Image (cartoon, rainbow, N blue to C red):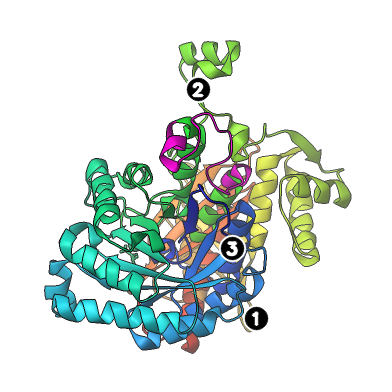
Protein backbone atom coordinates (compact mmCIF):
# COMPACT_ATOMS: atom_id res chain seq x y z
CA UNK A 1 0.00 0.00 0.00
CA UNK A 2 1.21 3.50 -0.79
CA UNK A 3 1.90 5.38 2.41
CA UNK A 4 5.14 7.19 3.03
CA UNK A 5 5.53 10.78 1.98
CA UNK A 6 8.68 11.84 0.13
CA UNK A 7 8.87 8.45 -1.54
CA UNK A 8 8.66 7.47 -5.15
CA UNK A 9 5.65 5.28 -6.00
CA UNK A 10 6.58 2.32 -8.18
CA UNK A 11 3.74 1.45 -10.53
CA UNK A 12 4.47 -1.80 -12.33
CA UNK A 13 2.85 -2.36 -15.71
CA UNK A 14 4.63 -5.61 -16.68
CA UNK A 15 1.29 -7.42 -16.79
CA UNK A 16 -0.39 -4.77 -18.96
CA UNK A 17 2.01 -2.75 -21.14
CA UNK A 18 4.78 -5.36 -20.75
CA UNK A 19 2.52 -8.15 -21.85
CA UNK A 20 1.70 -6.20 -25.02
CA UNK A 21 4.99 -7.15 -26.67
CA UNK A 22 4.74 -9.92 -29.25
CA UNK A 23 5.03 -13.39 -27.73
CA UNK A 24 4.99 -12.20 -24.14
CA UNK A 25 1.42 -13.43 -23.73
CA UNK A 26 0.89 -15.00 -20.32
CA UNK A 27 -1.92 -17.19 -19.07
CA UNK A 28 -3.85 -16.40 -15.88
CA UNK A 29 -1.76 -18.60 -13.58
CA UNK A 30 1.47 -17.13 -14.92
CA UNK A 31 0.11 -13.61 -14.43
CA UNK A 32 -0.81 -14.54 -10.90
CA UNK A 33 2.68 -15.97 -10.23
CA UNK A 34 4.21 -12.70 -11.49
CA UNK A 35 1.76 -10.56 -9.52
CA UNK A 36 2.64 -12.45 -6.31
CA UNK A 37 6.33 -11.92 -6.98
CA UNK A 38 5.74 -8.21 -7.74
CA UNK A 39 4.04 -7.96 -4.38
CA UNK A 40 7.06 -9.58 -2.67
CA UNK A 41 9.27 -7.16 -4.60
CA UNK A 42 7.29 -4.36 -2.95
CA UNK A 43 5.79 -2.50 -5.89
CA UNK A 44 3.14 -0.01 -4.79
CA UNK A 45 0.77 -0.47 -7.72
CA UNK A 46 0.29 -3.45 -10.05
CA UNK A 47 -1.42 -2.69 -13.34
CA UNK A 48 -2.84 -6.17 -13.69
CA UNK A 49 -4.30 -5.81 -17.18
CA UNK A 50 -6.93 -4.24 -19.34
CA UNK A 51 -10.13 -5.82 -18.05
CA UNK A 52 -12.31 -4.96 -21.05
CA UNK A 53 -9.80 -6.33 -23.59
CA UNK A 54 -10.90 -9.97 -23.37
CA UNK A 55 -12.55 -12.38 -20.94
CA UNK A 56 -9.05 -13.74 -20.16
CA UNK A 57 -7.80 -10.27 -19.22
CA UNK A 58 -10.89 -9.66 -17.09
CA UNK A 59 -10.38 -12.89 -15.18
CA UNK A 60 -6.68 -12.18 -14.68
CA UNK A 61 -7.38 -8.72 -13.21
CA UNK A 62 -10.11 -10.20 -11.02
CA UNK A 63 -7.96 -13.08 -9.75
CA UNK A 64 -5.02 -10.79 -9.00
CA UNK A 65 -7.39 -8.35 -7.28
CA UNK A 66 -8.68 -11.21 -5.14
CA UNK A 67 -5.41 -12.95 -4.27
CA UNK A 68 -2.82 -10.16 -4.31
CA UNK A 69 -4.93 -7.07 -3.63
CA UNK A 70 -5.06 -7.67 0.13
CA UNK A 71 -5.15 -5.13 2.97
CA UNK A 72 -1.34 -4.88 3.14
CA UNK A 73 -0.88 -5.65 -0.52
CA UNK A 74 -0.34 -3.33 -3.47
CA UNK A 75 -2.99 -1.25 -5.19
CA UNK A 76 -4.40 -3.30 -8.08
CA UNK A 77 -5.13 -1.30 -11.19
CA UNK A 78 -6.92 -1.97 -14.47
CA UNK A 79 -6.54 0.06 -17.63
CA UNK A 80 -9.67 1.37 -19.35
CA UNK A 81 -10.18 3.56 -22.41
CA UNK A 82 -12.25 6.66 -21.71
CA UNK A 83 -15.34 4.68 -22.61
CA UNK A 84 -18.10 3.71 -20.19
CA UNK A 85 -18.04 -0.03 -21.00
CA UNK A 86 -14.26 -0.19 -20.40
CA UNK A 87 -14.50 1.66 -17.11
CA UNK A 88 -17.41 -0.46 -15.88
CA UNK A 89 -15.49 -3.66 -16.74
CA UNK A 90 -12.41 -2.40 -14.89
CA UNK A 91 -14.50 -1.53 -11.83
CA UNK A 92 -16.18 -4.93 -11.84
CA UNK A 93 -12.90 -6.86 -12.18
CA UNK A 94 -11.30 -4.80 -9.41
CA UNK A 95 -14.12 -5.36 -6.90
CA UNK A 96 -12.24 -8.01 -4.85
CA UNK A 97 -9.20 -5.72 -4.34
CA UNK A 98 -8.95 -3.91 -1.01
CA UNK A 99 -7.14 -1.07 -2.82
CA UNK A 100 -8.30 -0.74 -6.43
CA UNK A 101 -7.55 1.85 -9.09
CA UNK A 102 -9.11 2.59 -12.47
CA UNK A 103 -6.64 3.98 -14.98
CA UNK A 104 -8.45 5.66 -17.83
CA UNK A 105 -6.86 7.31 -20.85
CA UNK A 106 -7.55 9.27 -24.01
CA UNK A 107 -5.14 10.75 -26.54
CA UNK A 108 -4.42 14.48 -26.50
CA UNK A 109 -1.94 15.02 -29.34
CA UNK A 110 -3.29 16.63 -32.51
CA UNK A 111 -1.93 13.79 -34.63
CA UNK A 112 -3.90 11.22 -32.59
CA UNK A 113 -6.99 13.44 -32.50
CA UNK A 114 -7.00 13.95 -36.26
CA UNK A 115 -6.08 10.48 -37.53
CA UNK A 116 -7.04 8.07 -34.77
CA UNK A 117 -9.84 9.52 -32.68
CA UNK A 118 -11.24 11.88 -35.33
CA UNK A 119 -12.35 14.21 -32.54
CA UNK A 120 -11.86 17.89 -31.77
CA UNK A 121 -9.97 19.16 -28.74
CA UNK A 122 -13.25 20.31 -27.20
CA UNK A 123 -14.69 16.82 -27.56
CA UNK A 124 -11.63 15.20 -25.96
CA UNK A 125 -11.76 17.66 -23.09
CA UNK A 126 -15.41 16.82 -22.42
CA UNK A 127 -14.83 13.06 -22.67
CA UNK A 128 -11.85 13.17 -20.30
CA UNK A 129 -13.84 15.08 -17.70
CA UNK A 130 -16.95 12.92 -18.04
CA UNK A 131 -15.09 9.59 -17.97
CA UNK A 132 -12.92 10.49 -14.98
CA UNK A 133 -16.12 11.41 -13.13
CA UNK A 134 -17.67 8.13 -14.26
CA UNK A 135 -14.64 6.16 -12.98
CA UNK A 136 -14.84 8.13 -9.74
CA UNK A 137 -18.42 6.94 -9.27
CA UNK A 138 -16.95 3.42 -8.82
CA UNK A 139 -13.85 4.10 -6.73
CA UNK A 140 -11.88 6.86 -5.06
CA UNK A 141 -8.54 6.02 -6.67
CA UNK A 142 -8.64 7.15 -10.33
CA UNK A 143 -5.68 7.69 -12.62
CA UNK A 144 -5.96 9.65 -15.84
CA UNK A 145 -3.51 9.54 -18.77
CA UNK A 146 -3.49 11.96 -21.70
CA UNK A 147 -2.02 9.54 -24.23
CA UNK A 148 0.85 10.88 -26.38
CA UNK A 149 1.17 13.77 -23.90
CA UNK A 150 4.78 14.28 -24.98
CA UNK A 151 3.64 15.36 -28.46
CA UNK A 152 0.59 17.29 -27.28
CA UNK A 153 0.21 21.06 -27.29
CA UNK A 154 1.27 22.05 -23.73
CA UNK A 155 -1.60 24.54 -23.26
CA UNK A 156 -4.17 21.90 -24.24
CA UNK A 157 -2.42 19.34 -22.02
CA UNK A 158 -2.63 21.70 -19.00
CA UNK A 159 -6.32 22.26 -19.65
CA UNK A 160 -7.11 18.54 -19.92
CA UNK A 161 -5.17 17.78 -16.74
CA UNK A 162 -6.90 20.55 -14.82
CA UNK A 163 -10.32 19.27 -15.86
CA UNK A 164 -9.41 15.63 -15.10
CA UNK A 165 -8.20 16.57 -11.61
CA UNK A 166 -11.32 18.67 -11.01
CA UNK A 167 -13.40 15.64 -12.04
CA UNK A 168 -11.64 13.48 -9.43
CA UNK A 169 -8.37 12.09 -10.86
CA UNK A 170 -6.03 11.41 -7.95
CA UNK A 171 -3.07 10.60 -10.20
CA UNK A 172 -2.29 12.21 -13.55
CA UNK A 173 0.06 10.15 -15.64
CA UNK A 174 2.12 11.79 -18.38
CA UNK A 175 3.01 9.32 -21.15
CA UNK A 176 5.71 9.60 -23.76
CA UNK A 177 3.81 7.03 -25.79
CA UNK A 178 6.21 6.99 -28.74
CA UNK A 179 9.48 7.41 -26.79
CA UNK A 180 10.27 10.71 -28.51
CA UNK A 181 11.50 13.04 -25.77
CA UNK A 182 14.98 13.79 -24.46
CA UNK A 183 15.61 14.04 -20.70
CA UNK A 184 15.69 17.83 -20.41
CA UNK A 185 12.53 18.15 -22.53
CA UNK A 186 10.75 15.55 -20.41
CA UNK A 187 11.82 17.24 -17.16
CA UNK A 188 10.69 20.57 -18.66
CA UNK A 189 7.29 19.13 -19.51
CA UNK A 190 6.78 18.01 -15.89
CA UNK A 191 7.89 21.41 -14.63
CA UNK A 192 5.46 23.07 -17.07
CA UNK A 193 2.63 20.95 -15.67
CA UNK A 194 3.58 21.85 -12.08
CA UNK A 195 3.70 25.52 -12.95
CA UNK A 196 0.61 25.80 -15.15
CA UNK A 197 -2.01 23.35 -13.89
CA UNK A 198 -3.67 25.29 -11.06
CA UNK A 199 -4.98 22.27 -9.11
CA UNK A 200 -1.92 20.02 -9.66
CA UNK A 201 -1.25 19.83 -5.92
CA UNK A 202 -4.43 17.74 -5.62
CA UNK A 203 -2.93 14.91 -7.70
CA UNK A 204 0.17 12.75 -7.88
CA UNK A 205 2.24 13.33 -11.01
CA UNK A 206 3.15 10.05 -12.67
CA UNK A 207 5.27 9.34 -15.75
CA UNK A 208 5.05 6.61 -18.36
CA UNK A 209 7.48 6.25 -21.24
CA UNK A 210 8.61 3.99 -24.02
CA UNK A 211 12.21 3.33 -24.87
CA UNK A 212 12.32 3.94 -28.62
CA UNK A 213 15.43 6.14 -28.31
CA UNK A 214 16.78 4.31 -25.24
CA UNK A 215 15.96 7.36 -23.09
CA UNK A 216 13.01 6.20 -20.99
CA UNK A 217 14.91 5.75 -17.71
CA UNK A 218 16.89 8.97 -18.13
CA UNK A 219 13.66 10.82 -18.92
CA UNK A 220 12.00 9.49 -15.76
CA UNK A 221 14.92 10.53 -13.57
CA UNK A 222 14.62 14.08 -14.93
CA UNK A 223 10.90 13.89 -14.24
CA UNK A 224 11.62 12.98 -10.60
CA UNK A 225 13.83 16.06 -10.31
CA UNK A 226 10.90 18.16 -11.52
CA UNK A 227 8.11 16.81 -9.35
CA UNK A 228 7.00 13.40 -10.64
CA UNK A 229 6.48 10.98 -7.76
CA UNK A 230 5.08 7.92 -9.52
CA UNK A 231 7.06 5.95 -12.11
CA UNK A 232 5.33 3.49 -14.46
CA UNK A 233 7.75 0.78 -15.44
CA UNK A 234 8.16 -2.90 -16.27
CA UNK A 235 10.48 -5.70 -15.20
CA UNK A 236 13.38 -6.04 -17.65
CA UNK A 237 11.92 -3.03 -19.48
CA UNK A 238 9.64 -5.26 -21.56
CA UNK A 239 6.77 -3.70 -23.48
CA UNK A 240 5.46 -2.39 -26.75
CA UNK A 241 8.22 -1.99 -29.43
CA UNK A 242 11.48 -1.06 -27.65
CA UNK A 243 9.76 -1.55 -24.31
CA UNK A 244 9.01 0.59 -21.26
CA UNK A 245 11.26 2.20 -18.68
CA UNK A 246 12.89 -0.62 -16.75
CA UNK A 247 11.92 -0.98 -13.09
CA UNK A 248 15.25 -2.38 -11.94
CA UNK A 249 17.23 0.42 -13.58
CA UNK A 250 15.03 3.13 -12.07
CA UNK A 251 14.99 1.60 -8.61
CA UNK A 252 18.74 1.01 -8.51
CA UNK A 253 19.53 4.47 -9.91
CA UNK A 254 17.39 5.99 -7.15
CA UNK A 255 19.00 3.73 -4.57
CA UNK A 256 22.66 4.00 -5.56
CA UNK A 257 22.41 7.76 -6.20
CA UNK A 258 19.99 8.60 -3.37
CA UNK A 259 22.19 11.41 -2.10
CA UNK A 260 21.82 13.05 -5.49
CA UNK A 261 18.04 12.59 -5.60
CA UNK A 262 17.21 13.22 -1.92
CA UNK A 263 17.02 17.04 -2.16
CA UNK A 264 14.58 16.87 -5.10
CA UNK A 265 12.21 15.03 -2.76
CA UNK A 266 12.69 17.51 0.04
CA UNK A 267 14.97 15.28 2.13
CA UNK A 268 18.34 15.97 3.67
CA UNK A 269 21.13 15.11 1.21
CA UNK A 270 22.57 12.31 3.32
CA UNK A 271 19.27 10.70 4.32
CA UNK A 272 19.66 6.92 4.15
CA UNK A 273 15.89 6.31 4.08
CA UNK A 274 14.98 4.32 0.96
CA UNK A 275 13.47 6.30 -1.90
CA UNK A 276 11.17 3.45 -2.89
CA UNK A 277 9.38 0.58 -1.12
CA UNK A 278 11.18 -1.97 -3.30
CA UNK A 279 13.02 -4.87 -1.64
CA UNK A 280 15.99 -4.74 -4.02
CA UNK A 281 17.06 -8.29 -3.07
CA UNK A 282 13.99 -9.56 -4.96
CA UNK A 283 15.01 -7.87 -8.22
CA UNK A 284 17.09 -10.65 -9.78
CA UNK A 285 14.53 -13.34 -9.01
CA UNK A 286 11.69 -11.23 -10.43
CA UNK A 287 13.69 -10.56 -13.57
CA UNK A 288 14.35 -14.29 -14.11
CA UNK A 289 10.71 -15.19 -13.49
CA UNK A 290 9.42 -12.61 -15.97
CA UNK A 291 12.02 -13.60 -18.56
CA UNK A 292 11.24 -17.31 -18.24
CA UNK A 293 7.47 -16.93 -18.32
CA UNK A 294 7.33 -14.38 -21.14
CA UNK A 295 10.15 -15.91 -23.21
CA UNK A 296 11.69 -12.42 -23.45
CA UNK A 297 15.41 -12.96 -22.94
CA UNK A 298 17.50 -10.44 -21.06
CA UNK A 299 20.46 -9.20 -23.09
CA UNK A 300 23.78 -10.08 -21.37
CA UNK A 301 24.90 -6.45 -21.10
CA UNK A 302 21.55 -5.21 -19.72
CA UNK A 303 22.07 -2.91 -16.75
CA UNK A 304 21.42 -4.46 -13.31
CA UNK A 305 20.05 -7.88 -14.38
CA UNK A 306 22.11 -8.85 -17.47
CA UNK A 307 24.42 -11.86 -17.13
CA UNK A 308 27.47 -9.59 -17.47
CA UNK A 309 26.22 -6.76 -15.24
CA UNK A 310 28.56 -7.78 -12.41
CA UNK A 311 31.25 -9.63 -14.40
CA UNK A 312 34.71 -8.14 -14.72
CA UNK A 313 36.64 -9.34 -17.74
CA UNK A 314 39.55 -6.92 -17.99
CA UNK A 315 42.64 -7.83 -15.99
CA UNK A 316 42.97 -4.30 -14.61
CA UNK A 317 39.38 -4.35 -13.38
CA UNK A 318 39.73 -7.83 -11.87
CA UNK A 319 42.89 -6.77 -10.07
CA UNK A 320 41.16 -3.67 -8.68
CA UNK A 321 38.02 -5.55 -7.56
CA UNK A 322 40.11 -8.17 -5.77
CA UNK A 323 41.87 -5.41 -3.84
CA UNK A 324 38.72 -3.42 -3.11
CA UNK A 325 35.32 -4.03 -4.72
CA UNK A 326 34.58 -0.31 -4.84
CA UNK A 327 37.37 0.29 -7.37
CA UNK A 328 35.15 -0.85 -10.21
CA UNK A 329 31.76 -1.65 -8.65
CA UNK A 330 29.13 0.92 -7.70
CA UNK A 331 26.80 -1.62 -6.11
CA UNK A 332 27.04 -5.03 -4.55
CA UNK A 333 25.54 -7.89 -6.56
CA UNK A 334 23.89 -9.14 -3.37
CA UNK A 335 21.83 -5.96 -3.27
CA UNK A 336 19.75 -7.21 -6.21
CA UNK A 337 19.56 -10.73 -4.79
CA UNK A 338 22.42 -12.30 -6.71
CA UNK A 339 23.81 -14.85 -4.32
CA UNK A 340 27.37 -16.12 -4.39
CA UNK A 341 25.89 -19.10 -6.24
CA UNK A 342 26.93 -21.54 -3.53
CA UNK A 343 26.85 -25.19 -4.39
CA UNK A 344 24.99 -26.63 -1.49
CA UNK A 345 22.79 -29.43 -2.70
CA UNK A 346 23.47 -32.76 -4.36
CA UNK A 347 21.78 -36.04 -5.04
CA UNK A 348 21.82 -37.03 -1.37
CA UNK A 349 20.10 -33.85 -0.24
CA UNK A 350 16.67 -34.50 1.18
CA UNK A 351 13.36 -32.71 0.92
CA UNK A 352 13.98 -30.61 4.01
CA UNK A 353 17.32 -29.28 2.76
CA UNK A 354 15.68 -28.58 -0.59
CA UNK A 355 12.72 -26.81 0.99
CA UNK A 356 14.82 -24.73 3.37
CA UNK A 357 17.24 -23.56 0.65
CA UNK A 358 14.27 -22.52 -1.48
CA UNK A 359 12.87 -20.59 1.45
CA UNK A 360 16.24 -18.91 1.98
CA UNK A 361 16.20 -17.97 -1.71
CA UNK A 362 12.77 -16.38 -1.19
CA UNK A 363 10.58 -18.89 -3.03
CA UNK A 364 7.16 -19.54 -1.55
CA UNK A 365 5.88 -22.74 -3.09
CA UNK A 366 2.67 -24.58 -2.38
CA UNK A 367 3.01 -28.22 -1.27
CA UNK A 368 2.10 -29.42 -4.78
CA UNK A 369 4.62 -27.09 -6.43
CA UNK A 370 7.27 -28.16 -3.93
CA UNK A 371 6.62 -31.84 -4.67
CA UNK A 372 6.87 -31.27 -8.41
CA UNK A 373 10.04 -29.24 -8.04
CA UNK A 374 11.58 -31.86 -5.74
CA UNK A 375 11.01 -34.61 -8.30
CA UNK A 376 12.73 -32.43 -10.93
CA UNK A 377 15.54 -31.64 -8.51
CA UNK A 378 16.21 -35.35 -7.89
CA UNK A 379 16.19 -35.98 -11.61
CA UNK A 380 18.71 -33.18 -12.27
CA UNK A 381 20.84 -34.20 -9.27
CA UNK A 382 21.17 -37.68 -10.73
CA UNK A 383 22.87 -36.19 -13.78
CA UNK A 384 24.61 -33.17 -12.31
CA UNK A 385 26.67 -33.74 -9.18
CA UNK A 386 26.43 -30.30 -7.64
CA UNK A 387 23.27 -28.23 -7.64
CA UNK A 388 23.81 -24.49 -7.22
CA UNK A 389 21.35 -21.73 -6.35
CA UNK A 390 21.05 -20.81 -10.03
CA UNK A 391 20.17 -24.43 -10.87
CA UNK A 392 17.53 -24.42 -8.15
CA UNK A 393 16.10 -21.22 -9.52
CA UNK A 394 15.94 -22.66 -13.06
CA UNK A 395 14.27 -25.83 -11.79
CA UNK A 396 11.68 -23.94 -9.76
CA UNK A 397 10.92 -21.42 -12.50
CA UNK A 398 10.46 -24.30 -14.90
CA UNK A 399 8.00 -25.98 -12.56
CA UNK A 400 6.10 -22.78 -11.75
CA UNK A 401 5.62 -22.26 -15.47
CA UNK A 402 1.94 -22.73 -16.15
CA UNK A 403 1.82 -23.76 -19.79
CA UNK A 404 -1.34 -25.69 -20.55
CA UNK A 405 -0.53 -29.37 -20.16
CA UNK A 406 -1.94 -30.49 -23.52
CA UNK A 407 0.89 -32.30 -25.31
CA UNK A 408 3.63 -33.81 -23.16
CA UNK A 409 7.08 -35.03 -24.21
CA UNK A 410 7.47 -38.69 -23.25
CA UNK A 411 10.53 -39.64 -25.29
CA UNK A 412 13.19 -37.94 -27.38
CA UNK A 413 15.80 -39.98 -29.15
CA UNK A 414 18.28 -38.71 -31.72
CA UNK A 415 21.04 -39.95 -33.89
CA UNK A 416 23.47 -37.41 -35.35
CA UNK A 417 27.14 -36.66 -35.94
CA UNK A 418 29.45 -35.83 -38.80
CA UNK A 419 28.74 -37.94 -41.86
CA UNK A 420 25.37 -38.87 -40.33
CA UNK A 421 21.88 -37.80 -41.23
CA UNK A 422 20.33 -36.19 -38.12
CA UNK A 423 17.32 -38.30 -37.24
CA UNK A 424 14.88 -37.93 -34.34
CA UNK A 425 12.16 -40.08 -32.86
CA UNK A 426 9.70 -38.49 -30.44
CA UNK A 427 6.79 -39.79 -28.45
CA UNK A 428 4.21 -37.26 -27.25
CA UNK A 429 1.22 -37.77 -25.01
CA UNK A 430 -1.70 -36.01 -26.69
CA UNK A 431 -4.48 -34.04 -24.93
CA UNK A 432 -6.64 -37.20 -25.22
CA UNK A 433 -4.05 -39.24 -23.31
CA UNK A 434 -2.91 -41.15 -26.37
CA UNK A 435 0.82 -41.77 -26.95
CA UNK A 436 1.90 -40.99 -30.50
CA UNK A 437 5.35 -41.64 -31.91
CA UNK A 438 6.83 -40.21 -35.07
CA UNK A 439 10.27 -39.69 -36.61
CA UNK A 440 11.90 -37.21 -38.96
CA UNK A 441 15.23 -36.23 -40.41
CA UNK A 442 16.52 -32.64 -40.29
CA UNK A 443 19.48 -30.38 -40.92
CA UNK A 444 20.56 -30.94 -37.31
CA UNK A 445 19.26 -32.75 -34.23
CA UNK A 446 16.99 -29.89 -33.06
CA UNK A 447 15.54 -29.46 -36.53
CA UNK A 448 14.88 -33.21 -36.72
CA UNK A 449 13.19 -33.20 -33.27
CA UNK A 450 11.01 -30.20 -34.21
CA UNK A 451 9.99 -31.81 -37.48
CA UNK A 452 9.05 -35.02 -35.69
CA UNK A 453 7.01 -33.04 -33.12
CA UNK A 454 5.27 -31.14 -35.92
CA UNK A 455 4.22 -34.41 -37.47
CA UNK A 456 2.41 -35.29 -34.24
CA UNK A 457 0.96 -31.90 -33.26
CA UNK A 458 0.16 -30.83 -36.80
CA UNK A 459 -0.41 -27.08 -36.24
CA UNK A 460 1.43 -24.93 -38.82
CA UNK A 461 3.93 -22.51 -37.29
CA UNK A 462 7.18 -20.73 -38.04
CA UNK A 463 10.09 -20.84 -35.58
CA UNK A 464 11.28 -17.25 -35.22
CA UNK A 465 13.70 -17.48 -32.30
CA UNK A 466 15.70 -20.25 -30.69
CA UNK A 467 18.22 -19.67 -27.97
CA UNK A 468 20.20 -21.87 -25.59
CA UNK A 469 21.82 -20.46 -22.47
CA UNK A 470 23.78 -22.27 -19.85
CA UNK A 471 22.52 -21.71 -16.30
CA UNK A 472 25.96 -22.06 -14.71
CA UNK A 473 29.51 -22.70 -15.85
CA UNK A 474 30.72 -26.26 -16.23
CA UNK A 475 30.29 -29.03 -18.74
CA UNK A 476 27.39 -30.58 -16.82
CA UNK A 477 25.45 -27.29 -16.62
CA UNK A 478 21.70 -27.10 -17.09
CA UNK A 479 20.83 -25.66 -20.49
CA UNK A 480 17.89 -23.29 -20.76
CA UNK A 481 16.13 -23.14 -24.11
CA UNK A 482 13.82 -20.27 -25.03
CA UNK A 483 11.92 -20.28 -28.28
CA UNK A 484 9.38 -18.12 -30.02
CA UNK A 485 7.16 -19.25 -32.84
CA UNK A 486 4.58 -17.56 -35.01
CA UNK A 487 1.16 -18.79 -36.07
CA UNK A 488 -0.81 -16.39 -38.30
CA UNK A 489 0.33 -13.08 -36.83
CA UNK A 490 0.52 -14.24 -33.20
CA UNK A 491 3.74 -15.09 -31.41
CA UNK A 492 4.00 -17.77 -28.70
CA UNK A 493 6.98 -18.49 -26.48
CA UNK A 494 8.25 -21.59 -24.73
CA UNK A 495 10.97 -22.19 -22.16
CA UNK A 496 12.55 -25.28 -20.59
CA UNK A 497 15.67 -26.29 -18.70
CA UNK A 498 17.41 -29.65 -18.78
CA UNK A 499 20.93 -31.07 -18.58
CA UNK A 500 20.27 -32.41 -22.09
CA UNK A 501 19.76 -29.46 -24.42
CA UNK A 502 17.99 -31.54 -27.05
CA UNK A 503 15.42 -32.60 -24.45
CA UNK A 504 15.15 -28.97 -23.26
CA UNK A 505 14.65 -27.92 -26.91
CA UNK A 506 11.85 -30.45 -27.35
CA UNK A 507 10.15 -29.38 -24.10
CA UNK A 508 10.43 -25.66 -24.88
CA UNK A 509 8.94 -26.27 -28.33
CA UNK A 510 6.06 -28.33 -26.93
CA UNK A 511 5.43 -25.62 -24.29
CA UNK A 512 5.09 -23.01 -27.04
CA UNK A 513 2.92 -25.34 -29.12
CA UNK A 514 0.70 -25.93 -26.08
CA UNK A 515 0.14 -22.18 -25.75
CA UNK A 516 -0.62 -21.96 -29.44
CA UNK A 517 -2.92 -24.96 -29.28
CA UNK A 518 -4.77 -23.52 -26.25
CA UNK A 519 -5.26 -20.21 -28.06
CA UNK A 520 -7.03 -22.03 -30.88
CA UNK A 521 -9.64 -23.36 -28.50
CA UNK A 522 -12.98 -21.49 -28.73
CA UNK A 523 -12.82 -19.40 -25.49
CA UNK A 524 -9.66 -17.60 -26.62
CA UNK A 525 -10.82 -16.81 -30.11
CA UNK A 526 -12.31 -13.38 -29.58
CA UNK A 527 -10.62 -10.20 -30.83
CA UNK A 528 -8.43 -8.53 -28.24
CA UNK A 529 -8.18 -4.77 -27.68
CA UNK A 530 -4.77 -3.30 -26.81
CA UNK A 531 -3.79 0.18 -25.68
O1 LIG B 1 2.09 4.38 -23.77
C1 LIG B 1 1.01 4.84 -23.38
O2 LIG B 1 0.64 5.99 -23.67
C2 LIG B 1 0.15 3.99 -22.58
C3 LIG B 1 -1.05 4.62 -21.95
C4 LIG B 1 -2.23 3.73 -21.98
C5 LIG B 1 -0.71 5.07 -20.56
O3 LIG B 1 0.46 2.83 -22.37
ZN1 LIG C 1 2.63 2.52 -22.78
**Tag 3 secondary structure:** loop
Image: 123 above or below 3: below
Q: Nearer the viewer, mark 3 or mark 1?
A: 3
**Secondary structure state at the residue bearing disc 1:** loop
The one of 481 and 39 positioned closer to us in this rendering: 39
Up-down relation of residue 71 to residue 191 (above or below): below
Range of magenta residues? 260-283
**Residue 474, image x, y percentages:** 63, 32
From mark 3 to mark 1, how far is it between C-alphas?
44 Å
Q: Quadrant of ligand 1?
A: bottom left
Which is more toward the observer, 45 or 334? 45
Q: Is residue 111 above or below residue 204?
A: below
The residue closer to the viewer here, 346 or 334, is 334
Say which label, 3 or 2, has the lower sequence index: 3
Q: Which residue is mark 2?
A: 312
State which tag comes first along the sequence, 1 or 2: 2
Q: Which residue is mark 3?
A: 74
The picture quadrant where one finds residue 70 is: bottom right
282 is within the stretch colored magenta: yes
Classed neighbour count for the residue bearing mark 1: other residues with Cα under 10 Å, few (<14), some (14–19), many (≥20): few
Whether the magenta-drawn stretch holds residue 192 is answered as no
Point out residue 473 in the picture as x, y percentages from the top left corner: 60, 33
Identify the residue position indicated by label 1 in the image: 434
Q: x and y percent of residue 509 in the render?
A: 51, 62
In percent of the image, x 38 and y 45: which residue is there?
224
Query: In the rendered view of the protein, which quadrant contains the C terminus?
Result: bottom left
The answer to whether the residue bearing label 2 lies less than 8 angstroms from the nearest atom of ligand 2 is no
Q: Where 453 falls versus 342 (above or below)?
A: below
- Is 94 left or right of 487, judged from the image as shown? right
Amino acid sequence: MINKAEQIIIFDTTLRDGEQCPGATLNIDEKLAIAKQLSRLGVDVIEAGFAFASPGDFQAVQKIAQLVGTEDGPVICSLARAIKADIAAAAEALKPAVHGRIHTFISTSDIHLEYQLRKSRAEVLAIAEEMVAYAKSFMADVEFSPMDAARSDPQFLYEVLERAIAAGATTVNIPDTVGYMTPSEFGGMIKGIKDHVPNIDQAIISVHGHNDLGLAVANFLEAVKNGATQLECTINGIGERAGNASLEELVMALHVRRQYFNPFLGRPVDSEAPLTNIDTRQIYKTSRLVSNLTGMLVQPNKAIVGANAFAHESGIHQDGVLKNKLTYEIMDAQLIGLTDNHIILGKHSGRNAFRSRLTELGFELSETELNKAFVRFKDVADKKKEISDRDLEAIVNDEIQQTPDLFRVELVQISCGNNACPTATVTLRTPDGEELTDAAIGTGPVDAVYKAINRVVNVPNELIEFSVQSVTEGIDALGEVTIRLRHDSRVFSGHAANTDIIVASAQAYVNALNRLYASLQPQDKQEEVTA
